Image (tube, rainbow, N blue to C red):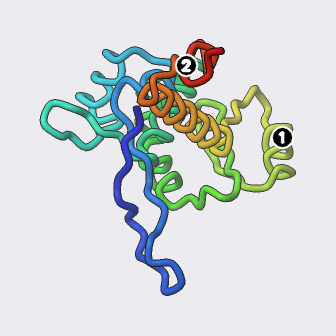
Amino acid sequence: MPQYTKSKKTASPQNEFEPVSPSFGSLDVAKLAGISLRQLQWWDEESVVSPLQSEHRRIYRFDETVLTMLVAGLRSRGISLQRVRWFLPHLRKRVGDWDTTGDLYLITDGRSAVFESEDESVILQASAAPGGVFVLSLGDITGLIREYTIQTERHSVLRRTGVSPQRGLRNHPAVRS
């Protein structure tokens, strides 16, 4: 289940309390990225994506979760880990600087990568490439993370109230006729 940490942003004068940034455990990140726990552990050991560690647990901040999903997306499209490592400094910087309110696309042919924020530019870049290109949307990735967070929170609330997430309210004592 996602954990929540204090936001790194400074409080604005109008709003003393900024929204918190979610953090995730290994199981959540592995599910989101579609990889095994062992693969995630190996990426940490090899410094591909290195999360925070608390006792014996890995804690992935939101940006590390996005980065992990990007790496998994690139690997699933056949891009070698050696090439992904070459992209990593650029990916880390762009993901860390990215304002999540807009969309950002990673376009790559496996040899080079470029980020675009305009839909038309993405289409032009992709159509101008002599070979095939892959386009990964950071907006889609963050949408998946947010949806996963909402679902897990919903399941957590339902479990605390004694409702089975699979059965819904139908077998809850307060609803039975």
Q: How far apart are the two marked residues, 2 and 1, measured between alpha carbons?
A: 58 Å
Circle 1 packing at 10 Å, graded few (<14), some (14-19), many (20+), is: few
Upstream in sequence: badge 2 or badge 1: 1
Say what amino acid the circle numbered 1 marks: Ala
Residue 70 % position (x, y) = 53, 35
Quarter-of-image position of residue 58 = top left
Quarter of the figure with the C terminus: top right
154 relative position to 3: left or right: right
Q: Which residue position is annotated with label 1?
A: 128
What element does badge 1 sit on? helix
Q: Is residue 82 above or below residue 120?
A: above
Say what amino acid the circle numbered 2 marks: His
Q: Which residue position is annotated with label 2?
A: 172
Residue at 43% from the left image edge and 47% from the top image edge: 22
Residue 81 % position (x, y) = 43, 25
Residue at 67% from the left image edge and 45% from the top image edge: 139
Q: Nearer the viewer, residue 163 or 30?
A: 163
Q: Nearer the viewer, residue 87 or 95?
A: 95
